[in-house]
Image (cartoon, rainbow, N blue to C red):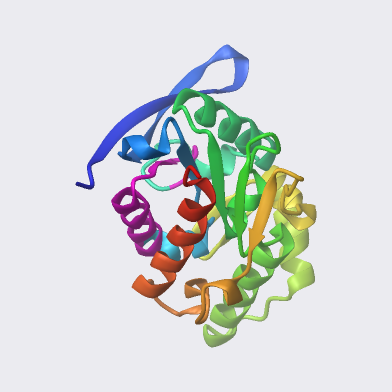
């Protein structure tokens, strides 16, 4: 039976401080041994569109017997930390920290989650996206919204603003450090990682929809790819 729990993990902050963040965890079954999948979710605007699908995936993994954990990153989801204070480099450290604290043996990075996946942890990258692509989509949305409001904004102007002072995009407040890192960030794919393309699951990516959604067939297909690879022979 699928069992859901909420736990905490401790991340390091500046000047020797720490903070507590939440993590959702689903139980597994003994046939998978100590295997546990760390899920690094889609980021920012895509996180909103993929949240229901990510939970559906975790339920499918648990039903198949594989445990999983979905941590909040500082500044995301239920975190009380301001996103404007975060950086990709700190998130990479946080991802490695939470993997260790939650006992993860493998990682699944979804879309922008691939920008921070631990290189040493075996696993999968689902439709990995560059930081520039994530920014481009959010910048386009802001420019269109400004045009409808009678204002003229350009990508170049917004890029300069983001790099110098930070910027708000799609309801997310980015600090200058995070914005600058995203412009050049590429998925952290190593020899330990297998890339899963959207075509491997069928249908279109849910991050392309205007609103949040879910697709049980895609969730089952992704869960099967992962559990079949980890199932003891």
- Residue 27 x/y as whole percent: 30, 39
Question: Which residue is at a point 54% across and 55% down the rendered structure image?
Answer: 43
- Residue 24 x/y as whole percent: 34, 41
- Residue 214 x/y as whole percent: 36, 71
The answer to whether one can see residue 153 in this image is yes
Task: Answer with left or right where residue 198 lies relative to residue 132.
Answer: left
Q: Which residue is at the far left?
A: 1
Question: Which residue is at a point 45% across and 67% down the rendered structure image?
Answer: 221
The answer to whether one can see residue 214 in this image is no
In the image, residue 67 lies in the stretch drawn in magenta: yes
Say which of 182 and 177 sits in front.
182
Task: Answer with left or right where residue 161 lies relative to residue 220.
Answer: right
Q: In which quarter of the image is residue 51?
A: bottom left
Task: Answer with left or right where residue 200 lies relative to residue 227.
Answer: right
Q: How many marks?
A: 0
Say which of 2 and 80 sits in front.
2
Q: Quadrant of residue 5?
A: top left
Question: Which residue is at a point 60% across and 77% down the rendered structure image?
Answer: 199
In the image, residue 109 lies in the stretch drawn in magenta: no
Q: Identify the magenta region.
A: 52-76
- Residue 57 x/y as whole percent: 38, 58
Question: Which residue is at a point 60% across and 52% down the rendered structure image?
Answer: 124
Q: Which residue is at the far top?
A: 16
Say which of 233 and 210 sits in front.
233
* 133 vs 72: above or below: below
């Amino acid at each position: 039976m699928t069992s859901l729990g909420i736990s905490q993990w401790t991340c390091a902050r500046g000047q020797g401080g720490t903070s507590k963040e939440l993590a959702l965890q689903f139980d597994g079954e003994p046939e998978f041994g100590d295997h546990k999948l760390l899920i690094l979710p889609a980021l920012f605007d895509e996180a909103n569109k993929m949240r229901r699908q990510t939970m559906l995936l975790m339920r499918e993994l648990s039903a198949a017997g594989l445990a999983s954990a979905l941590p909040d990153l500082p500044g995301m989801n239920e975190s009380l930390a301001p996103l404007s204070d975060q950086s990709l480099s700190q998130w990479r450290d946080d991802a490695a920290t939470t993997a260790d604290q939650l006992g993860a043996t493998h990682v699944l990075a979804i879309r922008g989650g691939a920008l921070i996946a631990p290189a040493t942890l075996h696993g999968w990258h689902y439709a990995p996206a560059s930081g520039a692509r994530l920014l481009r989509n959010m910048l386009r949305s802001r420019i269109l919204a400004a045009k409808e409001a009678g204002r003229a904004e350009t990508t170049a102007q917004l890029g300069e603003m983001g790099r110098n002072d930070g910027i708000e995009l799609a309801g997310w407040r980015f600090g200058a450090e995070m914005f600058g890192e995203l412009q050049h960030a590429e998925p952290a794919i190593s020899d330990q990682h297998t890339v899963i393309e959207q075509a491997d699951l069928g249908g279109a990516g849910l991050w392309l929809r205007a609103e949040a959604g879910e697709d049980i067939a895609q969730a089952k297909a992704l869960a099967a790819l992962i559990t079949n690879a980890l199932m003891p022979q």
